[in-house]
Amino acid sequence: MAVGSAAVGLAVAVTAVAVTGPWDSGQRTAERARAAAWHRQGGAEHTGGAPGGPAPAPSAPAVLTALGAPPDGGLGGDGSAPGDDAAPGSGSGSGSAPVPTRAALADALEPLLEDGALGTLRTASVVDVATGRQLYAVRAGRNVVPASAIKVATAVAALSAAGPDHRIATRVVWDADRKRAVLVGGGDPTLTRAELGRLADATARALEERGAQKITLDYDASRYTGPARHPIGVNDNIAPVGALMLNAGRLDGSTRGPAPRSADPAGEAAAAFADRLRDRGIDVGRPAHARKAPGDAEELAVHRSAPLSALVERMLTHSDNDIAEALARQTAIARGEPASFSGAARAVRAQLAEYGGRLPLKGARFADGSGLSRRNQVSSGLLTRLLVLSADPARPELRPVLTGLPVARFNGTLDNRYDDAATRAGAGLVRAKTGTLTGINTLAGTVVDADGRFLAFAFTASGTTDRQAAHRALDRLASAVANCGCR
């Protein structure tokens, strides 16, 4: 049977080739002749074909249209937006997606907000991104502990203060008088062993050019000041916050999530660098000491981190606490504040305050950049306004805040959620930053609703007792927004 089937198939193939004509360099000769004829007609317009040939394909319409954008682009460069008293759908432009009404959103969301899994205090905010209108609010101005959702504020502050293209430098400088090289940390928690090896390669070449085969090595992690330990103490969720470390001080080779951390990330990074130099024939001598580099030292080599835009995306997608604290300190450095917990807190708030009335900062508190501190206080209204600001066409530098949000049932901290019938409508559509501490659960992000309207939302739950149940309740709220035409 197999032999017979093969013979029949071969016969069919031969017949097809005979009918369609001979082949030449992977293309039938008839097709090639027709293509040549079209080319001789000009090629640029594609308005005709060879006699008897197929008619040209019609031009396709635009696949995606603006998501409810008004003719003037919605939020202007000055931050103006239509008032809350605007009629539903007003300013959305002809043919754009309709705006949900407050009453319809309330019908969809209020029964879900009554879920006891959401604890003793629930807040909610839904905002139309194109117009900036508040569409639905429940205690949206009430400041609560946001957990990791505060990383949205950290991201906006860092991108606006230092810029999306800023890269954090790890340098090696040369003190010729003392025959001393100094490894200088700039605050990059993502530095890998492979990158450190390439930095050692460049350093060894530079030393050989100077005839320095025997040196001493020190390290300088003084760019950050104040306590290195987060106030929560020793914790697998965060390393001591320092200006010099390898892979966020992780000791198990992981790249995300909780992990045992080094008690001395800077010292261990310097020891690893010394080993790399020895491997390349440099006699390093004694162990590296922590000493400040001379201000006039010559730079031998430098490694630069990924752009701040990429660090923001990585921080938000995986809720990376080490990157978050680094970004808060980069904000402090950009604003001339000490790169410490307290300096970063002042810098983040001051940077956000520069947006004026666009961000409701009354009573907000930024005790850290990661959200591990229970001293943080922000409102769901502030979280949604940060997201709206990040979508402003006049603020492209903030776009990584949106592109870095985890996608429901796809990646990051939402990859294993939205897997039941009640939340499946949000899978792949909801993009949101999670926030979880004991008794605290938050979800803040964006979604395109069933009518194609782009919305920002934030839901917070305080006093929860079942983390997984709270997650499911928050996911149902976001899925309801995704599934809602709500008119």
Image: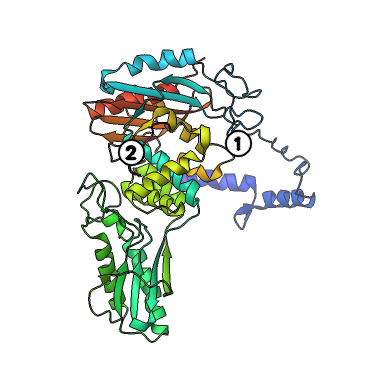
| Residue found at x 57% / y 27% | 131
Tell me the kind of residue under disc 1: Asp
Is residue 248 found inside the magenta-colored segment of the image? no
| Disc 2 packing (10 Å; few <14; some 14–19; many ≥20) | many
Asked if residue 357 lies left or right of residue 255, the reply is right
Q: Earlier in the sequence, mark 2 or mark 1?
A: 1
Mark-to-mark CA distance, 2 and 1: 29 Å
Q: Mark 2 or 1, which is nearer the eye? A: 1
- Label 2 sits on what residue type? Ser
Prevailing secondary structure class for the magenta stretch in the rendered image: loop
Could you say whether the residue bearing mark 2 is in a helix, strand or loop?
Answer: helix
Residue 482 visible to an observer of this rendering: no
Judged from the image, the secondary structure of the residue bearing numbered disc 1 is loop
Foreground of the two, 252 or 191 = 191
Q: Which residue in the structure is indicated by mark 2?
A: 148
**Callout 2–callout 1 Cβ contact below 8 Å:** no
* Residue furthest bottom as drawn: 211
Q: Name which residue lies at 47% across and 35% down.
A: 387
Choose between 192 and 444: the one closer to the eye: 444
Residue range in magenta is 362-372
Q: Does 15 sit left or right of 443 as displayed?
A: right
Place of residue 467 in the rendered image (x, y in percent of width and height, measured from the top left): 24, 29
Residue holding disc 1: 78
Q: Position of residue 211 (x, y in %)?
A: 38, 87
The residue lying at 53 percent from left, 25 percent from top is 453
Q: Is residue 367 above or below residue 327?
A: above
Q: Nearer the viewer, residue 121 or 73?
A: 121
Q: Is residue 371 magenta?
A: yes
In the image, residue 199 lies at what x, y percent? 38, 69
Q: Quadrant of residue 417?
A: top left
